[in-house]
Amino acid sequence: MSLTVEKCLQAWENSFRQMNAKADIVFFGDSLTYYGDFSSVFPDKVVCNLGLRGDTIQGMIERVELVNLLEPKVVYLMAGINDVATCTSRQFEESYDLMICKILEFIEKDGLVIQSILPVNDVDYNISCNNEQIKDCNRIIVKLANRYHLQYIDLYPIYLIDGVLPKDYTIDGIHPRKSEYSKWYNELLKNRNI
C-alpha cells in the first residue's frame, strides 16, 4: 500500500471515529464502486461509498475495518477487476474468501450482498484483462457466495452485448459512463433487501 493511500485511509478512519459516523448501507469496492452514485438508489437510507480507485482485494482486506466502523446493516461488495489479470484462480479465490470472512466477522450473512465483476471491452481499448478471465473470476465469486449462503447480484450480463462491454457504454473499456450506472442501480432496486 502506498504512503498516500495509507494516509488517506487513516484520515477516513479518524473522521469516521470523530464523527461517530454510521451508515445503513456501505458500498465497498474499487473504482467501479467509487464512481457510482448509490445514495440516489437508496434516498431514504444513509449510504457510504467506500470505493477506492485502483484497489485490489488485498487492499480491501487491509481496509475492511473502515466498513466495520460504520456499523452498516448491509454491505454491497464488488471486488476483483484489478486482480483479474495478475492473480491465478487459486490466489483470487483465497483472497476473495478471506475478504468475505473478514466482513462476516461484523455483519450477518443476510447483510452481505456480493456483486459480480462487470465485463470489459478489450476490442476497442488496450486493457490488461479480458472477459474470459472475468468470467472465470465471476464463477469463483458465485461459488463463494453459495458457500457462505450470501445474496449474489449478477451484473455481468446486463452490460454484455456481443461478447463485450459496448464502446458506447464505457469511457475506457472498464468503467461505465455515468449514464450507464442506471443499469446497475436498477438491478440493486430489483434485489433490494433493506
Image: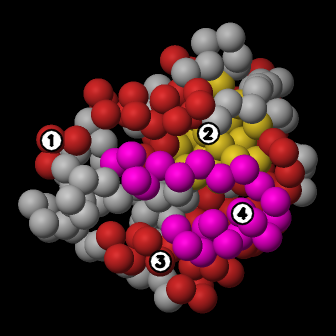
Q: Earlier in the sequence, mark 2 or mark 4?
A: 2
Alpha carbon separation for disc pair 2 and 4: 17 Å
- How far apart in space, not on screen, are marks 1 and 4 (Cα)? 31 Å
- Where 83 falls versus 194 (above or below)? below
Q: Tell me the residue at 50%/88% (across/down).
A: 88
Secondary structure under badge 4?
helix
Main SS, magenta residues:
helix
Question: Mark 1 belongs to which amino acid?
Answer: Asp
Give the residue type at disc 3. Asp
CB atoms of marks 3 and 2 within 8 Å: no
Out of 51 and 177, give the one closest to the viewer: 177
Q: Secondary structure at mark 3?
A: helix
- Residue highlighted by disc 4: 145
Q: Amino acid at mark 2?
A: Phe
Q: Which residue lies under the disc numbered 1?
A: 168
Mark 1: few/some/many CA within 10 Å (<14, 14-19, 20+): few
Of tags 2 and 4, the one toward the viewer is 4
Q: Is residue 58 left or right of residue 164?
A: right
Q: Which one is earlier in the sequence, the residue at label 4 or at label 3?
A: 3
The residue sitting at 84% across, 45% down in the picture is: 110
Note whether 30 is above or below 12 in the view shown: below
SS for callout 1 = helix
Q: Secondary structure at mark 2?
A: strand
Within 10 Å of the Cα at label 2, are there few (<14), some (14-19), or many (20+) other Cα atoms?
A: many
